C-alpha cells in the first residue's frame, strides 16, 4: 500500500461489516481511504463499521448490482455493505482523475502527494444531510457523505 501511494495510486477500502466491531484492515491503515456506509436517507448504517479511521461515508444500502445466478445467467438485485459504498468512492476517484487529467494532477502533485490531495478534497467536499446533521458523529463516520459534484468542482 505504501509503495502504491508513493507512485500516486489512490487506495480505497471498505471499513467493514459485522461480525467486525471496528474498522478492518486494510481500511484502518493511514495510507488508505476508509469508507463507511449510509442508508438511502443519508443516515449512517447501524451495521457499518465505523471509527476514527473512517475518511468518508457513501451509499451502501439498497445499492443495485449485477448478480450471477449461473455461469450464463445474470440478474440485477439490491445489496448492501461497505464494499458497495467503497465502489461509489472509487468511481468518484476515477471521475476526479479523468476530469482533471491524471498526468496533469501527477505533475502538480507528484507521487504520494496525489492521494493525499485527493483525500483532502474528498473530505472537504463531503456533506451531511440536514435531517441527520445533529446526530452525525464525525469521529465515527468522517466529515460526511461523498459529494461527487463538489469533489469535481473543488479547486485543485
Image: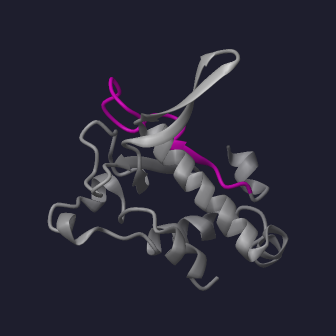
Work out whether residue 8 or residue 95 is closer to the camera in this orientation and state it.
Answer: 95
Q: Nearer the viewer, residue 30 or 49?
A: 49
Position in image of residue 40 (x %, y %): 32, 52
Q: Looking at the picture, how far across and down is residue 121, in whole percent?
A: 54, 73
Quarter in which the N terminus is drawn: top right
Count every numbered label the image shows and give the total: 0
Left or right: where does residue 28 sit relative to residue 67? left
Residue 150, position in %: x, y?
Answer: 50, 77
* Residue 17 on the magenta segment: yes
> Is 47 placed left or right of 79 in the picture?
left
Residue 101 % position (x, y): 79, 72
In this image, 5 relative to 26: left or right? right
Find out whether residue 111 is within the magenta segment.
no
Residue 15 in view here: no
Q: Magenta segment range?
A: 9-29
Report the quarter where the C terminus lies. Answer: bottom right
The secondary structure that most of the magenta stretch takes on is loop
Quarter of the view holding residue 71: top right
Give the residue at x 56% y 46%.
87
Residue at 53 percent across and 74 percent down: it is 149
Amino acid at each position: 500500500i505504501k509503495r502504491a501511494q508513493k507512485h500516486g495510486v489512490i487506495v480505497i477500502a471498505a471499513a467493514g461489516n459485522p461480525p467486525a466491531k471496528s474498522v478492518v484492515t486494510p481500511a484502518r491503515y493511514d495510507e488508505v481511504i476508509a469508507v463507511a456506509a449510509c442508508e438511502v436517507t443519508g443516515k449512517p448504517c447501524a451495521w457499518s463499521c465505523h471509527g476514527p479511521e473512517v475518511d468518508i461515508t457513501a451509499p451502501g444500502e439498497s445499492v443495485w448490482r449485477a448478480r450471477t445466478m449461473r455461469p450464463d445467467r445474470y440478474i440485477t438485485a439490491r445489496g448492501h455493505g461497505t464494499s458497495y459504498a467503497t465502489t461509489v468512492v472509487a468511481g468518484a476517484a476515477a471521475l476526479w482523475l479523468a476530469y482533471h487529467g491524471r498526468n496533469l494532477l501527477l505533475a502538480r502533485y507528484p507521487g504520494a502527494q496525489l492521494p493525499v490531495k485527493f483525500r483532502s478534497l474528498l473530505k472537504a467536499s463531503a456533506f451531511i444531510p440536514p435531517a441527520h446533521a445533529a446526530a452525525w458523529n464525525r469521529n465515527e463516520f468522517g466529515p460526511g457523505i461523498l459529494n461527487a459534484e463538489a469533489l469535481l468542482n473543488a479547486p485543485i
